[in-house]
Amino acid sequence: MLKKLLIFSVVMFAFGYGLVPFYEKFCEVTGINNLLQPDILADDNQVDTNRWVTVEFDANIRGLPWQFKPVQSSVRIHPGEPVDVMYEITNNSDREINGQAIPSYSPRFLERYLKKFECFCFTQQTLKPNETRQMPVQFVIEPGLPADINTVTISYTFFELPSGTAPIKGN
Amino acid sequence: MAAVHGDLHGHGHDEHIPSGIMRWVKTTNHKDIGTMYLWFAFTMFLVGGTLAMGIRAELYQPGIQILEPELFNQFTTLHGLIMVFGAIMPAFVGFANWQVPMMIGAPDMAFARMNNWSFWLLPVAASLLIASFFVPGGAAAGGWTFYPPLSTQGGLGVDMMIFAVHILGASSIMGAINIITTILNMRAPGMKLMDMPLFVWTWLITAYLLVLVMPVLAGTVTMLLTDRHFGTSFFNAAGGGDPVLFQHIFWFFGHPEVYIMILPSFGIVSEVIPTFSRKPLFGYSSMVYATASIAILSCFVWAHHMFTAGMPTVGQLFFMYATMLIAVPTGVKVFNWTATMWRGSMTFETPMLFSIGFIFLFVIGGFSGVICAIVPIDIQVQDTYYVIAHFHYVLVSGSLFAIFAGAYYWIPKWTGRMYNETLGKWHFWLSMFFFNLTFFVQHFLGLAGMPRRVPDYALQFADFNKISSIGAFGFGLTQLLFLYIMISCIRSGEKAPEKPWDGATTLEWTHLPTPAPYHSFVTPPVINK
């Protein structure tokens, strides 16, 4: 009895850890929370040439000696039109650093209408001392975006990853 | 607690009870360990209560008077942790230690040495929690649910809290293993599972819940620890983790945990009400099945704590309906208690008063729970005082009132002395009045939009907060009356009759003298049906 119950406790401890990959798999399969996955453009995507939307770009760094900025601060587009923009990072320090960018959007529900095909935020970025890199972001803002929204903001924040961190899952 | 004298060489007289402090350190007797659990729980109840007094004192008026916001957050965090893990849970384990062997006719717990160890882990964990107030950066301040990123950022106090939770978890798991084994293997010959008193049944199911979810909590805090110090990124978005994942794993533990804190109180109430109604419990088997259904359902409702954390509508609907389903077996229980009282020869001694108070107020807490389960309402009241009012109605007037009922009910059996009935009734009515004064108005505060975990608030909340604070001070002081009643009962109470409650039918009343001897049921009792 004691042995069985102890083994059961250990199994439940492992189950707690098992919830981590399960959660990731669940989110991937159901398409919830897929910040790290490229999107696929719907076949019936149409460009709404009657509307203009201004997309502003923002860049932040949190605790690492990099310079990080968008090459263009904003673009004016039609919803449904593919957009290609560039961000630039420079490592100002004399050591090699791993970083990961986390996106955030304003308004928050922009995520629903934003389809990203290519983004530096899908993978971690490793920069050698004094290296500069330009990185593309390709996306479409779907015409379903509510009509009262004329300006949206896409923002990225780079965080430092400790060296030797395992590559982010989902890539 | 009484025997802290220095005489280590004292000789036991009465039934070879060792004396001196080493009796308590080394004891493997279920009654001694039960006593220590109960005193420990009461001490922690006073510590957690003191923190609550600090919180209510700060909230007495708008503005910052007594506690700086940082310290206020530490108070709310530690109040929750200490009350949940230090007061309510150990109190129920104390009852289990005293009562389970006596109610099933067993001589002691199955693993007596492990029983001692699971108790003595508790003071260590409690010291860690209390000491964390005095380290640089202070105690953990991110709420008792310690969500990241706050809990991955705090200082040494958070590490001490994590370690304390590890220890408390280990203690609970050992206690649960002990209780399961005792109940399944050591019942008196002839006592089938469906003959067991309901208190034993509820504890058996609670113990299974404990071994099911406590290890998951241990896993969660271990992930937090490795995120903090060993470079993992389970909950760190920058490293590919997800803070929402923490909430899922935490509440996978956390929701069964709230039933761990209420099921044993269902058991106590199910013993007290038939005794004072002088009728057998109505619907015994439906009570057992209802308890089991609540336990099983409790594992599938966790995300109702996270409706605002971001979830697809299908998920919200699933967790909403599953949560509301729990009201069905709970309703069965309330119906059965009421039906037990129906046409009974009822008397209203203190244990019965606390049990009836339990039913009234727990039902209010249950209803506000159903209201919170409804997604569109929950999105409004999430993290407001409405939620605070809800869970204090189920935890204070639920679990705590049942603990009081149990203490008054069994203290004559434990000590051989009666408590002061008049003072007991005063304790009940004062608790009842001040409890409602404290927490009923918090429903209004929550509906009006006052958020929880804030040291200051907008002026329109001032009146209700003042009323709530006055109630809280009254409730706190009333509990000192409980301490006085218990101590004077133990030291100088009138001698209890052999069977003070004539409606009692369980083995500890029918087959054992009062007070219960130090070693009971050395030979198993004969069960005649």
Image: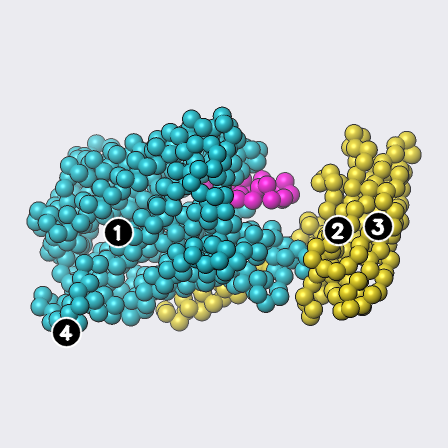
Chain colours: A yellow, B cyan
Please tell me whether mark 4 sits on a helix, a strand or a loop.
Answer: loop
Under mark 1, the amino acid is: Pro
Query: Would you say residue B307 sits in the magenta stretch?
Result: yes
Q: Nearer the viewer, mark 2 or mark 1?
A: 2
Which residue is at 80% across, 65% downward? A127
| Disc with the residue nearer the chain's start (1 vs 4) | 4
- Where on the picture, by quarter, is residue B350? top left
Which chain's residue wears label 1? B
Query: Would you say residue B358 sits in the magenta stretch?
Result: no
Callout 2–callout 1 Cβ contact below 8 Å: no
Looking at the picture, does residue B267 appear above or below residue A146? below
Under mark 2, the amino acid is: Asn
Q: Nearer the viewer, mark 1 or mark 4?
A: 4
Q: Main secondary structure of the magenta part?
A: helix
- The residue that label 1 is drawn on is B197
Under mark 3, the amino acid is: Pro
Q: Would residue B90 be found to the left or right of residue B191 on screen? A: right
- Quote the CA–CA distance across marks 4 and 2: 70 Å
- Quote the CA–CA distance across marks 1 and 3: 70 Å
Looking at the picture, does residue B460 appear above or below residue B282? above
- The residue that label 4 is drawn on is B9
In the rendered image, residues at marks 4 and 2 fall on the same chain: no
Please tell me whether mark 3 sits on a helix, a strand or a loop.
Answer: strand
- Quote the CA–CA distance across marks 1 and 4: 40 Å
Residue B387 image offset from top left, x and y in percent: 47, 38
How crowded is the residue under tag 4: few (<14 C-alpha within 10 Å), some, or many (20+)?
A: few
- The residue that label 3 is drawn on is A70
Please tell me whether mark 2 sits on a helix, a strand or a loop.
Answer: strand
Residue B79 image offset from top left, x and y in percent: 41, 48
- The residue that label 2 is drawn on is A60
Under mark 4, the amino acid is: His
Residue B46 image offset from top left, x and y in percent: 31, 48
